């Protein structure tokens, strides 16, 4: 029992997992190995890591719910019962002993069944649905009449509450939640998380939370376990890990998360990307990106071991770094820098009283929004989903026709691209370009990166020889041989870089960015934000930066507009709005950014 | 709001149907005119082609008028509820169709029912046993069914079960319900073989897709019984299966032509073949109209089925 150092290591832990390994026999790949951990009864543990680090597979293997074609080995004991070799015990335990809440509230419910019925389906035999369903609904903060509704009639937050009620219906002693709030708005996310934590404490359940957000893990759970490339890197109590990290990867992950309370000159980012488990076989998975790596790091796989600093064992801490004890003290937090003062110049973009009302929607998407962007200025537009941010961006980019109001690009009226002549449209496209949240859907999957970029250069009347292409690729931090690849072969960060390269090929004066980093992992997000800041300097490009993430907008925007249901409720210098918000809605948004403290959810 | 949307939808649908029917009838009219051989030739038969007889025929069937006038005359009749008189038999077209419609409807209904009852359960078995021997068997059977031409299947069935074993009659329609069903069984099977393949393919694919959805994993994870979980997935595969059913039934309407000829059944299909051979323009036009309307009716039924199966359609909600 080399691993058992959990705080509540009393009698029998609620979960004990030893040496889990997940393989895909058809390809011979190993996706996960040597994952061991314990969760005591009533304890909450967060599994943290970037996309592809193996968090989901870990809990899926633990619950015996692996996707088709994957196999797990290793010991799993749940509530004292060995279940990994006993499918019937697993089936017996599901619902009553252990239950799972999944990530996406829009897909986790049966779309054709009323909410109340779905909750009732999970009740133990003999329970009276007429009594239990309203009780469960009340427990998750929903009125009883929601039982009669179909999932499509409910908002994302309500669906996730229904999901929670359904997961709780069998009265489990262990609740596992796989990124239960990632698909929700920041404010809804905080509500749902605090609800889950309250229920967990009231019912005294053991709780496993999967998240990619280290600060959210600190705020929600007693202990954290950091994973990378299919292995455990570091474990410890939330407070201790927050205070002191014994693995370089944990440090890098924490540093890459932008703070909401100040603007950093640069967000520290580690170059490179998370390797696949097998690509890092026989060595430390982080070695290629680790600035402290020594030759021994590549001769074997470092196991998670208790950390001993100057002779003293750190209670409850494990680290899979060979040099855990000798890591240099982390650098002091960078002081903040102030955002740039506004520029007094003819604006490159002026939006006047923009209105848009979609047919069939109960309220307008844009109810008269006005804003300006000066040359070289970065203007942030923040708000929750449904506040009209994306509609605004799409109107400015000519992808959506406003019902009223005016859009002036470089002084020319671009309110209705349909009525503009060809030359005028081309001129507008040279002034402004757009990048989107999901780079995958905006890149043509059939074309190589090179073909896409060459077309963009041509469209702007620029030379598009191999050298020009290479220069463009280098300007976004991609290697020149990437030109021959297709989008399917690229990672999310690389795709977004290609999309950025396409947008800046013609050196536009304005770049419209619609949630450009929200689909990316924190470390990739830091890289892309760094790239955007650099491009902005080099091309003296203005940006209209749309995001729901206040910490991100803090790092890049000079001025802010806060949108709520289609109206602008607050505007001003970014520092002023975020340090001294005047409107209650801005304050709510700010409060929903996890700060890593244990009382964030209270 | 939703009510107005639905009204608009129906209106658009109706207008679309009218346009399709109009184009189709003009097309058929033109094609029949262009096809080799002429009506008067057929009508004359072995009689000597004297000037009088030709003139009489031309006057009787208005063949001396220019083509557009002939078409408009026919159209005017249809709009007044008169489908015209068959050139071939001299009977009103409406009566001829009325006699033969029940048989074709019964054949298609019987065939569709057979295909549904065999195809969907097989598809479900395939999906639940994905990748195993039973699944491979089901998939292979589906492919074989799909690629077998209905008339060949019909001939084979006739040779084996009617001529050889003598279990079923070789032709005719029978008297009384049971006897009629017995007579229609082989034709319906011939019609259903291909449709079974389609149903297997569609229902298997739909169910496999649903079984991979999050809500199925979530249902299993919170301890729902295997039957309840499969129930969730089946209910959700209903909409794609309905879509397939619409396609299959419309396909069967076309399939009746060959099957009715093979089994010498006096249905609409064989009527169509006879009328086309004879250049019986009023009959062909009316049949074209009828088949179009039948297809529209099937699609309408499918739409109604959607709104029964899916509350998102019923409440005019957005699918998300
Ligand atoms: N069904 C599957 N078949 C093959 N490989 C898979 C499958 N599911 C996941 N993987 C691979 O296993 C690794 C770990 O995946 P996993 O889903 O556990 O990551 P994760 O940490 O949950 O990431 P995310 O934050 O994106 O959810 C990844 O490299 C992934 O590509
Ligand atoms: S083991 Fe070596 S490479 Fe890995 S994190 Fe530690 S120092 Fe870096
Ligand atoms: Mg995951």
Image (spheres, coloured by chain):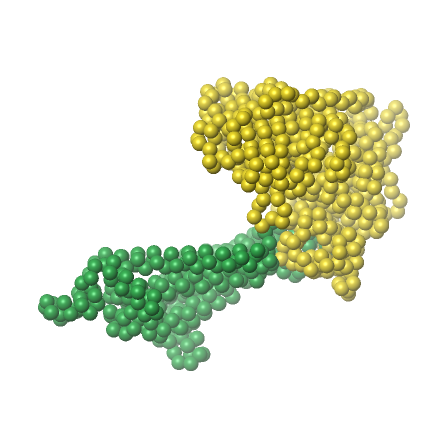
Left/right placement of residue A387 relative to residue B238 reads right
Give the side of residue B99 with respect to residue A466, left or right. left
Left-right relation of A448 to A270 = left
Which chain can be seen in yellow? A
Measuring from the top left, give residue A498's x and y in whole percent.
56, 29
Query: How many dots with numbers?
Result: 0
Q: Chain B's shade in the image?
A: green
Residue at image position (78%, 21%) is A335
- What residue appears at the point 26 percent right and 66 percent down from the top-left corner? B280
Residue situated in front as seen by the camera: A272 or B78: B78
- Residue B64 appears at what percent x and percent y? 18, 63
Which is nearer the eye, B132 or B242? B242
Question: Where B246 falls versus B184 (above or below)?
Answer: above
- Residue pictured at 48% horizontal, 64% vertical: B115
Res. A460 in view: yes
Compare residues A264 and A399 and report the one nearer the observer.
A399
- Quadrant in which the N terminus of chain A appears: top right
> Residue B272's x, y, as percent?
31, 66
The percent position of residue A269, horizontal first and vertical second, equals 69, 25
Taking the view exactly as shown, the residue that stands out farthest to the bottom is B176
- A338 or A488, which is in the foreground? A338
Quadrant (top left/top right/bottom left/bottom right) for the C terminus of chain A: top right
A602 relative to A578, above or below? below
Q: Is residue A65 among the parts visible in the rendering?
A: no
**Residue A328 location, quadrant:** top right
Q: Quadrant of residue A287?
A: top right
**Which residue is depicted at the point 86% across and 26% down?**
A309
């Amino acid at each position: 029992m080399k691993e058992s150092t959990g705080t509540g290591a009393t009698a029998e832990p609620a979960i004990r997992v030893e040496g889990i390994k997940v393989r895909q026999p058809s390809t011979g790949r190993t996706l996960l190995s040597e994952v061991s951990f314990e969760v005591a009864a009533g304890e909450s543990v967060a599994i943290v890591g970037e996309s592809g680090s193996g968090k989901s597979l870990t809990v899926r293997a633990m619950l015996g719910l692996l996707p088709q074609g994957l196999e797990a080995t290793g010991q799993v004991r749940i509530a004292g019962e060995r279940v990994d070799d006993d499918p019937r015990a697993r089936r017996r335990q599901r619902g009553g002993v252990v239950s799972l809440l999944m990530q996406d509230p829009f897909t986790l419910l049966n779309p054709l069944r009323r909410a109340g019925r779905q909750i009732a389906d999970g009740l133990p035999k003999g329970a009276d649905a007429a009594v239990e369903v309203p009780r469960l609904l009340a427990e998750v903060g929903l009125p009883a009449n929601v039982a009669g509704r179909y999932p499509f009639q409910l908002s994302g937050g309500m669906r996730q509450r229904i999901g929670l009620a359904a997961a709780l219906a069998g009265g489990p002693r262990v609740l596992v939640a796989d990124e239960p709030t990632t698909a929700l708005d920041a404010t809804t996310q905080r509500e749902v998380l605090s609800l889950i934590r309250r229920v967990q404490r009231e019912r005294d359940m053991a709780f496993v939370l999967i998240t990619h957000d280290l600060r959210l893990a600190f705020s929600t759970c007693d202990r954290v376990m950091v994973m990378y490339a299919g292995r455990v890197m570091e474990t410890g109590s939330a407070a201790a890990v927050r205070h002191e990290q014994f693995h370089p990867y944990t440090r890098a992950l924490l540093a890459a998360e932008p703070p909401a309370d100040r603007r950093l000159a640069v967000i520290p980012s580690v170059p490179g990307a998370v390797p696949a488990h097998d690509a890092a076989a026989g060595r430390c998975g982080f070695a290629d990106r680790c600035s402290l790596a020594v030759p021994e790091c590549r001769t074997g796989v470092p196991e998670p071991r208790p950390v001993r600093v100057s002779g003293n064992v750190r209670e409850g801490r494990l680290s899979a770094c060979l040099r855990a004890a000798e890591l240099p003290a982390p650098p002091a937090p960078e002081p903040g820098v102030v955002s740039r003062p506004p520029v007094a110049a003819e604006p490159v973009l002026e939006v006047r009283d923009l209105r848009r009302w979609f047919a069939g929607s109960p309220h307008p998407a844009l109810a008269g929004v006005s804003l300006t962007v000066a040359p070289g200025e970065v203007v942030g537009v923040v708000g929750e989903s449904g506040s009209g941010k994306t509609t605004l961006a799409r109107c400015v980019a000519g992808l959506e026709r406003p019902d009223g109001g005016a859009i002036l690009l470089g002084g020319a009226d671009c309110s209705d691209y349909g009525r503009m002549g060809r030359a005028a449209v081309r001129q507008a496209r040279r002034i402004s370009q757009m990048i989107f949240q999901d780079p995958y859907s905006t890149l043509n999957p059939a074309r190589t990166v090179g073909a896409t970029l060459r077309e963009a250069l041509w469209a702007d009347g620029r030379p598009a020889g191999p050298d020009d292409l290479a220069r463009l690729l280098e300007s976004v931090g991609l290697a020149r041989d990437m030109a021959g690849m297709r989008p399917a072969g690229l990672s999310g960060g690389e795709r977004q870089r290609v999309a950025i390269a396409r947008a800046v090929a013609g050196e536009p004066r304005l770049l419209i960015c619609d949630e450009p980093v929200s689909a990316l992992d924190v470390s990739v997000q830091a890289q892309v934000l760094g790239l955007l800041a650099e491009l902005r300097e080099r091309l003296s490009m203005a940006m209209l930066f749309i995001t729901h993430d206040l910490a991100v907008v803090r790092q890049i925007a000079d001025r802010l507009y806060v949108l709520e249901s289609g109206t602008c409720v607050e505007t001003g210098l970014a520092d002023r709005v975020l340090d001294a918000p005047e409107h209650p809605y801005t304050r709510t948004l700010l409060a929903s950014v996890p700060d890593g403290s244990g009382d964030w959810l209270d | 709001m939703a009510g107005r949307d639905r009204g608009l939808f129906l209106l658009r649908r109706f207008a679309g149907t009218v346009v399709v029917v109009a184009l189709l009838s003009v097309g058929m009219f033109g094609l029949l005119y262009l096809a080799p051989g002429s009506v008067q030739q057929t009508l004359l038969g072995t009689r000597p082609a004297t000037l009088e007889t030709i003139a009489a025929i031309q006057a009787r069937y208005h063949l001396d008028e220019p083509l557009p006038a002939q078409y408009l005359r026919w159209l005017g009749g249809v709009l007044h509820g008169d489908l015209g008189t068959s050139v071939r038999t001299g009977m009103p077209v409406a009566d001829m169709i009325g006699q033969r419609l029940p048989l074709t409807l019964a054949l298609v209904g019987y065939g569709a029912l057979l295909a549904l009852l065999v195809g969907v359960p097989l598809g479900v078995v395939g999906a639940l046993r994905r990748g195993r021997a039973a699944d491979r068997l089901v998939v292979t059977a589906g492919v074989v069914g799909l690629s077998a031409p209905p008339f060949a299947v019909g001939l084979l069935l006739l040779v084996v079960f009617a001529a050889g074993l003598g279990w079923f009659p070789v032709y005719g329609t029978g008297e009384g319900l049971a006897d009629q069903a017995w007579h229609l069984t082989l034709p319906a099977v011939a019609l259903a073989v291909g449709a079974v393949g389609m149903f297997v393919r569609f229902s298997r694919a739909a169910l496999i897709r649903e079984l991979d959805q999050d809500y199925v994993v979530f249902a299993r994870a919170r301890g729902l019984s295997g039957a309840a979980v499969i129930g969730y997935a089946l209910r959700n595969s209903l909409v794609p299966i309905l879509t397939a059913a619409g396609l299959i039934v419309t396909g069967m309407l076309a399939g009746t032509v060959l099957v009715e000829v093979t089994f010498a059944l006096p249905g609409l299909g064989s009527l169509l073949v006879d009328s086309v051979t004879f250049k019986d323009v009023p009959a062909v036009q009316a049949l074209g109209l009828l088949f179009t309307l039948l297809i529209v009716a099937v699609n309408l039924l499918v739409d109604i089925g959607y709104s029964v199966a899916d509350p998102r359609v019923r409440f005019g909600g957005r699918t998300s």
